[in-house]
Image (cartoon, grey):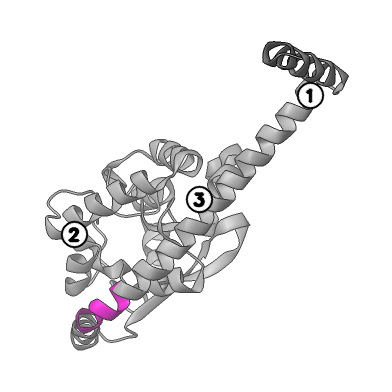
Amino acid sequence: MTAESQLVSVKLIRGLMAKGRPSKSPTYQQSAQSQRARSQRFNRLRQKRVFDILFAATILVILSPLYLVLAALIALTSPGPIFYCQERIGKHHKPFRCIKFRTMVNNADTLLSEMVSNCPQLRQEFESDYKLRQDPRITRIGKFLRLTSLDELPQFWNVLKGDMSVVGPRPLVPEEVPRYGRYMDRVLRVQPGITGLWQVSGRNDIPYQRRIQIDVYYSGHHNWVLDLFIIVKTIGVILFPGNNGAY
C-alpha cells in the first residue's frame, strides 16, 4: 500500500468516526459557555481578593504613623471616640460594621434627627442624597478628613476582614437599598469598595440615579485594569482634592 493510499484510508476512517459521534447540541454549547463564564468570574474574584489582602496590609503598615497622627488630632480637637462605626450592606445583602475616622460631633445622629424634624428643606436634602452640603455637625478636623478622603483609611481593616474590597460599588446604608430597586442584586454581587467609579467621578455632586448607574456598570464590568485606573485616580483626588464633590 502506497503512502498516498494510507493517507486516504486514515482520512476515510476519521470521517466515519466523526459521523458516528453525536453532535453537540446548542444546549450543550450554551451550558459549556456558561460554565466557562462562571469559572472566569470565580478566577477574577479570587485574584481581586488576593490583591485586596496584599494592598490593605501594605497600606496599614506603611501608613501606621499617619493613623496615629490623625487619631491624636481627632482626640485633641473633639470629645468622643476616634472611630465611627456604621452599619452598611455588603456582598449578597450581608450587613457589616463599616469603620471610619470620626468626622462629626459625638451626638451627630441625635442632632440630625432634630435638624430634619425642624427644617423641611434639610429633611428633603438628606432624603435625596443622604448627605448635607452644609452640615454643622462636622468638626474642623473632620472637614479636612472628608475633603481628602482620609476618614476612610480605617476601612482597610474592613478589607482585611473580607467585608469590603479596595475598589467596588459604594457601601450602602440600609435605608438606601430600596432606591436601587431591581439593580440591587446586581450591585451586591461584588463587595463594596473603599473607592470606586463614583468616588473618582464627582462623588456627591453626581445625581443619585447616576450613582446607581455607575455602581451597576462597575459590578458587571470590573477587571484589574479598571481597578488600577480607579486607584490611580483616587490617589490624585487625595493629593489634589480641589472640588472633588466631597463634603
Q: Residue type at mark 1?
A: Lys
110 in magenta: no
Earlier in the chain: of badge 2 and badge 1, it is 1
Where 227 falls versus 67 (above or below)? Answer: above
Q: Amino acid at mark 2?
A: Ile
- Residue at numbered disc 3: 44
Cα distance, mark 2 to mark 1? 54 Å
Along the line of sight, the residue nearer the viewer: 146 or 217: 217
Residue 238, label in figure: 2
Q: CA distance from mark 3 to mark 2?
A: 27 Å
Determine the secondary structure under disc 1: loop
Q: Which sits in the foreground, 227 or 198?
A: 227
140 displayed left or right of 112: left
Residues rendered magenta in the picture:
59-66
Query: Which dot, 1 or 3, sits closer to the camera?
Result: 1
Q: Is residue 214 visible?
A: yes
Residue 7, image x and y in percent? 70, 16
Labels 3 and 2: the sequence-earlier one? 3
**Whole-percent x, y for residue 125 in the image:** 36, 48
* Residue that carries the numbered disc 1 in the rendered image: 24
Q: Residue 40, image x and y in percent?
A: 56, 45
